[in-house]
Amino acid sequence: MKLVGLSGSKVGSKTRTAMDYTLKSVSEKYPEAEITLLDLAEFDVQFSDGRNYWEYDGDTKYVTETIMGADAIIIGTPVFQASIPGTLKNIFDLLPVNAFRNKVVSMLVTAGTPKHYLMAEQQLKPILAYMKAQIVQTYVFIEEKDFHRKEITNDDVLFRIERLVEDTVVLTDTYKRIREAKEAEYDF
Amino acid sequence: MKQYRIDPSKGLEFGLYSIGDHTPNPFTGSRISAEQRIHELIEASKLADEEGLDVFAVGESHQAYFTTQAHTVILGAIAQATKKIKIASSATVLSTSDPVRVYEDFATLDLISNGRAEIVAGRGSRVGAYSLLGYDVRDYEELFEEKLELLLKLNAEEKVTWEGQFRAPLENASILPQPRDGHLPIWRAVGGPPGSAIKAGYAGVPMMLTTLGGPAINFKGSVDAYREALEQNGFDPAELPIATTSLFYTAENSQDALREYYPHLNLGMQALRGGGYPKQQFAQATDYRDALMIGSPQQIIEKMHYQYELYGQQRFMAQIDFGGVPFDKIAKNIELIATDILPAVRKFTARN
């Protein structure tokens, strides 16, 4: 299974920290998984200009092709102005409409205030659903107070991350089996 | 209809077209050379001509996985290789060409073919041509509208005086050679939403509408919008032909058609659009209400019947070589069209 961790912001460290914890948990529990971290802070991604994603060069091509090649994607995002950051939205804009068909996508959200808890429901999930993702419904919401010097200090968050990882992998395997069984019936 | 060289009493015209895509054959994993691909296109046009099909068309796309960028050159070879079949583009990306050169080319094709050439002018759903040929894709809409206007003017007038944004002005210019009858059938290629269909209606230009798949009824909106726009602008919808186009594959029976075609469709979509064709959607496509022309000859006939009732179009164009379909299968498709499908379709569409 190819799993991509997409850290969606160029600003701050909380989302990247949470993503590191998450991917570490994946590699410990599922050593056979092929894991790639895409931290958008480390890439110079162009704004979408209407081209097909494979027609870009450099970082833009690498990031989009890596995402398109994944079986599962764990998106980490902070909350900017009550929504996702533009850097993450731009990734979606670079991809084709049905980009997440046959992919499982799960989410972790970092935020400065609990008031943002529903951001993922109202802003992120509709985009993922439109792009045909199989969404892991439960996401991990992590607040400022759960971090201390780039470490997560809240055990509840740590347990939730473990469950998110398990749900992502189990659902990816399950949907794959369902799809294979269904496609085998078609006889073409 | 006469000025568009269409005789409705003979029934629906049935044509073939290629966008010249050049992908590997998924069954073998290998790709034929561009040379072979082009020769096989010319061979296919000969077969279609011999079998009595009405139209053969070739389009241009300027990027990887395509091989008919110089589509007018290939159409020249086809004009020479065939006798009766109409030859057209599918489409000419007018936005990145000079309408004067396009008109010269097709007028010449018309003379080579003894009056069989037509232009189908489009904007290009793939934008590769824009940067390659030095145009800004941000002028996508205006480039096309201005150039189509000029192309239609060249077709209508003997001495042309014209001025625009994207080309040097013309002062009392004669475009030579002139086509055989002094003018050519010129169609506007329309894809997807009705916006472009309405523009074709405003200009009183025949419309070639792509209905690549999904429910056929979804494209009815564009057909109606076109005819309504024609009427609003003083044109008679009964005088302006509509053509529809679709991906096409048939075999002796439905199951063979599905089995033989799915890998081509899936791979072609993967190469051109970055995502394959879902099996679930493909399984629904043999239904007569789905626009994708896949199935046994009988299923294709049912689909044609349904679509003819729905659109009342004058021409149907089948794309039979998508995703690396090999030549023997293309030949088989042409044979099935000629022996099973065409006689039935002509029977229920001819008016005498």
Image (cartoon, rainbow, N blue to C red):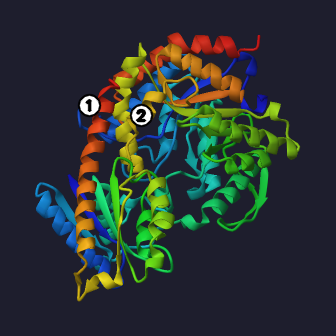
Q: Amino acid at mark 2?
A: Gln
User: In the rendered view, would you say A125 is above or below A80?
Assistant: above
The percent position of residue A64, horizontal first and vertical second, equals: 34, 63
Q: On the picture, is A70 further left or further right than B223?
A: left
Check disc 2 and report its element: helix, strand or loop. helix
Q: Nearer the viewer, mark 1 or mark 2?
A: 2
Work out whether residue B134 or residue B303 is closer to the camera in this orientation and state it.
B303
Q: Residue at x 38, y 18 (%)?
A: B255
Q: Residue at x 61, y 32 (%)?
A: B216
Work out whether residue B7 or residue A76 is closer to the camera in this orientation and state it.
A76
Q: Residue at x 70, y 34 (%)?
A: B242
How crowded pointer 2 is (Cα within 10 Å; few <14, some 14-19, many 20+) is rated as few
The percent position of residue B7, horizontal first and vertical second, equals: 74, 22
User: In the rendered view, would you say A69 is above or below B12?
Assistant: below
- For disc 1, the marked residue is B27
Mark sitting on residue B330: none
In which quadrant of the rendered image does the N terminus of chain B lie? top right
Does the rendering let one see residue B305?
A: yes
First reached walking from the N terminus: tag 1 or tag 2: 1
Mark sitting on residue B280: 2
Check disc 1 and report its element: helix, strand or loop. loop
The percent position of residue B144, horizontal first and vertical second, equals: 64, 57
Pointer 2 chain: B
Asked where in the image residue B68 lies, by quadrant, the reply is top left
Work out whether residue A103 or residue A64 is closer to the camera in this orientation and state it.
A103
Q: Amino acid at mark 1?
A: Phe
Does the rendering let one see residue B185?
A: no
Pointer 1 chain: B
